[in-house]
Amino acid sequence: MTARQKTDVLVVGSGFGGAIAAYHLAAGGAKVVVLERGPWLSGEEFDHDFKFGSSTTRVFDFVVGDGMSILGGNCVGGGSVVYFATMPRAPRFVFERRGSIGRRMWPGSITRDALEPWYDRVAEALPITPTGWDEVPYIGGVFAAACRAAGHTVNPSPSAVDTSLCTNCNWMMSGCRFDAKRSLLLNYLPAALSHGAEIRPLHEVQKITRTDDGSYQVHYSTIDEVDYRQHTGGGVIEAKIVVLAAGAGATPVILQRSEADLGPMPHAVGRYFSGNGERLNTAVLEDEKVRELLGLSRDEQKAYKGYQIGRGPVVASWDRLDGDLPEYERFSLEQLYFPPGFGTILAQIPDADGPSWFGPRKKEMLRKWQSWLTVFTMSEDDNEGVFGPPPPTGNSARLSQQLLGFGALSYRPTANTLRGWEVSDAAVKQILEHDGLARVMPWTNDVIGAYTVHPLASCRIGDDPHSSALDDRHELRGHPGIFVTDGSAVPGALTVNPAFTIAALAERAMPGIVRAARARGVNVVYGAPSPEGATSSRKATAAAAAAMVGG
Amino acid sequence: MHSAEPDHDVRTLTLEAFADTIIPGEKRHPEDRAVAGVSTGGGAVAAGAVPILETPEGGMEGALDDLAVALNGHARAYCASHDLEPDPALPFVGLSYDHRTALVQQLVSPDHPEKMMWVGVAMFSYMAFDTGAHMHTTEALAAGHPGLRTLGFADPDEDGLWRFPQYSYGRQLADIHPDTDATGSPS
C-alpha cells in the first residue's frame, strides 16, 4: 500500500492510552486512525487453549531483554485484553516520590487529589467496581486468612470484572471468552468506532517523520496474521497530531528509530524505564495446615488446592503502602494466579542443594501445583532500565511466529530496588511460613533476569526537561504535536497495578491534546461523555478540562 | 558453534536428554537412554518437548541441528575435564543424570555466553510439560498429557470451556486496611 493517506490524528496502539485518545478525539469531531500491531479478536475468538496459534499466543508478547523481560498485550485493546483487571488507585505518597533524581518525579500539577476526578471518569467508563468478600476466590481467601493470622490487613481490590458473567476460569490472560472482563473492546473502542474512528490491526508502526508544514508522517508495516515475523507490506499516513501509545516497551523504540529523521529526542526517551518494582514469590501450601490453622475448608477432601480457580489477583495487602516508610521499602502484596507455561519455570524449590528451578525436586513441586499460591510484589524500583539501539523493526527480534522475541532493554537493579525486593520477600515469608502453613521462595532472577507485566516510565512526564521526555500535558519535548499517553508516560513505579493510573492520566491528557489539535487546524472539541453516555464524571472534570483546553 | 547436520536420531536423543534434565520422567522402555529415569511418571520428553521444539510456530526448528552438535561438544569437554570417557555417538546422552545436571547448570548460569540459547531450550521444555503447546489443551488432557495431569490441571466442561461455579469460601477473612477510601482503593 503506497497511496498517500491523511488523517487529523494518528494513534499508535489501542490499549488504554490509545483507546481513550481515539474515543475523545473521534467523538470531538476529528478524523482518527488507530494503528495496532496485533490482531483484532473478540468474544469467542478468545480460546481456552495453550496451543501455539490460539489466542494465548496471538494476543500476548513476551520480550526478553538483558536483565528485564516484559509481558504485554499485542492486540486491539492492548493490555486491557490480557490484564487481570485489578484496578486500585495509586496511593497518595506515590505522587510525591523522588526516585533516582533527588527531586519530585511527578509534574507539580499532578497529585492524587488532582488525578481523582480523572480516575472517576475511567471508573465510570469501564466500569470499575468494588469486590465483595463473597466474590473472592479460594486463593484470595487463603491469602487473606494467612495475612490475618500474621497480623496483616487485606483488601479485595476494585476490579473491572463483571462478576455476574465471570466463571472464574482463570483464562483471562488469553482474553475473556465471556466478556466478563471489562476490556477496552467493550467501552472506549466501540464508542470510538461509532464516532468514525478507524482501527487497523496488524499494522506495526516503525517510525515517524516530519513534513515541511509541521505535520507528521507515520510509517508502518503490515504484519502477517499468523507469523508476526513476516511483513506483508507497508505504507505512510500523514497526520497533524500523533498520539503514541504503543506501550512502555515499544513507544520509546519508535521514537529512537525516528530520531534520524525527526532530530534529537529528549534525553529521557528510552531511559528511566521502571518494571513497577515487580517480584514474585511462590508458596506451596500444606492443605491440612490450611484447615487447622486457618479454619478453611472447601469440602471434606480439600481445604484449598484451588490454584487454578479464580480470576488472577483479587485481594491485596496494603499494610506497607505507608507514606511514612522510607522510599523503596513500600510495596503491596497481591495474591496471584499465573498460568502454566510462564508461571512455573522461575518458581524455586525451597532448600535446593542442586538446581533451584529444574530437575526432579522441581517436578515434585509441580505435582503440588493446585496447592500453589503466588504472591505478587509491586514495589518502588529505581527507574534503572535503559533501551539500547532499536532492532530493525518492531521492538524485538522475534524468535517465534508469535509471543517470543528479544528486545534491547537492559536493566541492572540498584541496591534500592534489591532492598525493596528483600524486604517484601521477608514479608511474604512472615505471612505464609508461620506454623508450617507453607514453604515460600522468590522466583529466580538468574534465568531471564527480572520481569514485569507492568512496564512503565520509558518516556515519562515531568517538570525537569533532563529527566522527563514529556511535559505535563504529555507532549514530547521539542516535537510539538507528538503526544505519549501510555504506560511509558507514568514517571515511576506505582506500588499497585498501574492500568487505572495509566488510563486516568490518558483521560487527563485529552483536553490538552484537543487544544493542540485545534491549534493545528483540526476541527475538534473536547467534552464527550462516558462511552456509554453517562455524564456524572464529566461534570467533575469540566473545570479542569476547560482550563486545559483553553476555555 | 559450527554448522553440522547430525543424524536425526542423534539430534532427537540429545534434545530429549536435555529436556529430561529440565523436567525428568520415567523411561519409556527398558532401553531408553535419552530419558534417565530419575522420576516417576512422564516428564518433559513424554509431554512433547521435541515435537514442540520442532514446530514451525516455536521458531527453534532451524537451530536444532546446531544445538545438538553444540550440546555434544560441551558434553565432550565436560567429560575431558571430569576424567570421563564420552560416549562416541551420544556424548550428552551418555552422561549420568547428575553429570547432565551439572553441565546444564553451567550452560544456563548467568555468565555463560550461550546462556540465552540453553534457557530457550529449557523454556520450551517447560512449555511442553506445563501446557503441551503442540496440542489443543482439551485434546492433551483427553490423551492424558503427563504434564497437565501431573499439575492436576482440571478438566473442562463438555463444551471445552472451563467454569468453576464453586469458587469462594464466601466470607470475610481479614480486616481491611483502615485507610481504604470510599472507592475501595488505598488512600
Image: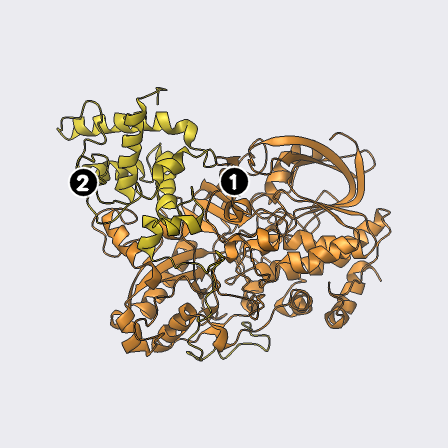
Q: Quadrant of the N terminus of chain B?
A: top left
Nearest to the observer: residue A83 or residue A521 = A83
Residue A444 in sight: no
Q: Classify A234 as above or below B181.
A: above
Instruction: Look at the image and give the colour of chain B.
Output: yellow
Task: Point out residue A155 in the picture as x, y percentages from the top left corner.
Answer: 48, 74
Task: Point out residue A117 in the picture as x, y percentages from the top left corner.
Answer: 69, 69
Left or right of A349, for residue A501: right
Q: Secondary structure at mark 2?
A: helix
Left or right of B8, for residue A162: right
Which mark is on residue B98? 2
Write down the residue under mark 1.
A402
Question: How dense is the environment of label 1, judged by Cα within 10 Å: few (below 14), some, or many (20 and up)?
Answer: many
User: Which chain shows up in orange?
Assistant: A
Q: Write down the quadrant of residue A162 in the picture.
A: bottom right
Tell me the CA gap for discs 1 and 2. 35 Å
Nearest to the observer: residue A211 or residue B56 = B56
The amino acid marked with disc number 1 is: Gln
Have a look at marks 1 and 2 and say if they share a chain: no
Q: Chain of mark 2?
A: B
Task: Point out residue A194 in the picture as x, y percentages from the top left corner.
Answer: 77, 55
